[in-house]
Amino acid sequence: MKKIATLFVMVAFSVILCGTGFADWSQQFSQSSTETYSGTPVGEFDRIGIWWDGNDKFATPAFNSFSGSGWTNYNLSDTYAYAIGSESTNLNFNISFSGDKSAGTAFYLMVANGADIRQRQYAEFDGSNWNVSYGTSFPEVSPESWKGGTAVTPEPLSSALFLLGGVTLVAYQYRKGKKKSV
């Protein structure tokens, strides 16, 4: 009976830890070199940065599922993240958000090639529709500052590894107890 209770506690604890990661949601976005910003095509780009407007937060990792190779996510905080990769003309990627999707959100997005800012957007989501505007006021940040930080491990993966370790430990203890009783 004690072993069943231990197993139940381990599974419940793991579900609670994993559950926080699964409450997050993501949205696929596409960046193209043919988009225009201030009347000029964006052209090739190798950096994308995002900043929250307000108290919302990005999930970890903020950027994922890149359609092009060589792109890496960097979360500098839960309100600021960027991705750096090889020069691209078209790129699909997901941005992951924390919290309730129906509550909506808003963030700034900047696209650059090296130190050359190519596009600034303000994206708002009302819970069902996206609205993007250009030329809004923007955080004071330069693409040169998009270095440092560390690539992050997806949080659901960490939770799954913890769950696997917990199940392995419970199984080991169960087998160890069974051998003593024989």
Image (cartoon, rainbow, N blue to C red):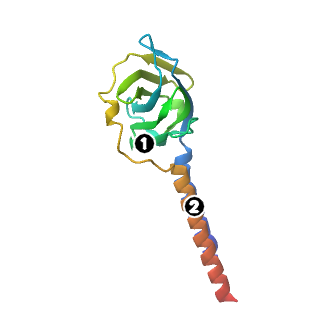
Q: Helix, strand, or loop for circle 1?
A: strand
Q: Do labels 2 and 1 touch, CB within 8 Å?
A: no
* Mark 1: amino acid: Tyr
Expressed as whole percent of the image width and height from the top left, the position of residue 4 reads 64, 71
* Mark 2: amino acid: Leu
Above or below, comparing residue 21 to residue 160 in the picture = above
Disc nearer the start of the sequence (2/1): 1
Around disc 1, counting alpha carbons within 10 Å, would you say few (fewer than 14), some (14 to 19), or many (20 or more)? many
Expressed as whole percent of the image width and height from the top left, the position of residue 141 reads 31, 30
Of residues 96 and 49, which is closer to you in this image?
Answer: 49
Q: Helix, strand, or loop for circle 2?
A: helix
- Which residue carries the number 1 mark? 74
Expressed as whole percent of the image width and height from the top left, the position of residue 126 reads 51, 24
> Which one is in front in this view, the residue at disc 2 or the one at disc 1?
1
Left or right, 142 with respect to 92, comes to left
- Which residue carries the number 2 mark? 163
Q: Is residue 172 visible?
A: yes
Split into 4 quadrants, where in the image is the C terminus?
bottom right
Residue drawn at x 55%, y 38% is 25
Expressed as whole percent of the image width and height from the top left, the position of residue 120 reads 40, 22
Farthest residue to the right: give it: 182
